[in-house]
Amino acid sequence: MNVRFRCNGRAVEVDVPPMSRLLDVLREELRLTGSKEGCGEGECGACTVRIDGEAVMSCLVPVCQVDGASIVTIEGLGASVVHPVQTAMLQHGGAQCGICTPGLCMSAAALLERNPHPSREEARVALAGNLCRCTGYQKVVDAVCASLAPEGS
Ligand code: FES
Ligand code: FES
């Protein structure tokens, strides 16, 4: 099946089985390996991307569902200007091994766009689908709450 969508602002077309996982298409067809596979079952959030603005776990999405959609991956989040949440994650020590970090940043970017000044509780709720085995979440929440989303992020 030919599937056309926008990815990080670029029009792309792939010819793949319709039920291919979006995560696999991104990583293997488009060579965008920033989105990680942790569980492959919608439990960890390491594969989170934004589809039409919403943070979505790409391991759960058949590629046929994104025909015509606009997708942003971690490669697109800081492509022109580093996103404030990426800077804050560095400054606050919110990344350790890093496997969860791309997904956390995508969920955080979606939160900050709809709520530029989240409380710690709001940040925790928004990141609840993103598991991290290293940081204990405190520094991640510190980073998200210290970020202010740029316009149009
Ligand atoms: Fe998609 Fe874990 S790899 S949620
Ligand atoms: Fe290692 Fe989050 S930094 S899992």
Image: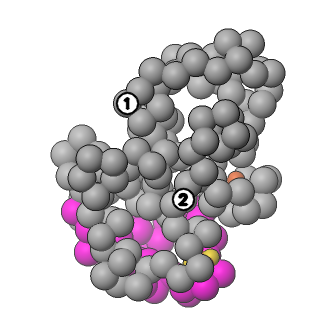
Reading the image, the residue beneath label 2 is 103
- What residue type is disc 2 on? Gly
Could you say where residue 35 lies in the image, as x and y percent from the top left? 59, 53
Quarter of the view holding residue 72: top left
Quarter of the view holding residue 91: bottom left
Image side of residue 106 versus residue 143, left or right: right
Q: Is residue 134 located in the magenta-colored stretch of the structure?
A: yes
> Which residues lie in the magenta part?
120-148
- What residue type is disc 1 on? Gly
Quarter of the view holding residue 58: top right
Reading the image, the residue beneath label 1 is 9
Could you say where residue 112 lies in the image, as x and y percent from the top left? 31, 56
Which residue is most to the top?
2
- Of residue 137 and residue 67, the one placed in the foreground of this image is 67
- Image-quarter location of ligand 2: bottom right
Is residue 99 something that shows in the picture?
Answer: yes
Image side of residue 118 versus residue 30, left or right: left
Which residue is most to the left?
151
Could you say where residue 48 lies in the image, as x and y percent from the top left? 57, 51
Label 2 environment density (alpha carbons within 10 Å; few <14, some 14–19, many ≥20): many
Name the residue rendered at 56%, 87% in the picture: 136
- Label at residue 132: none
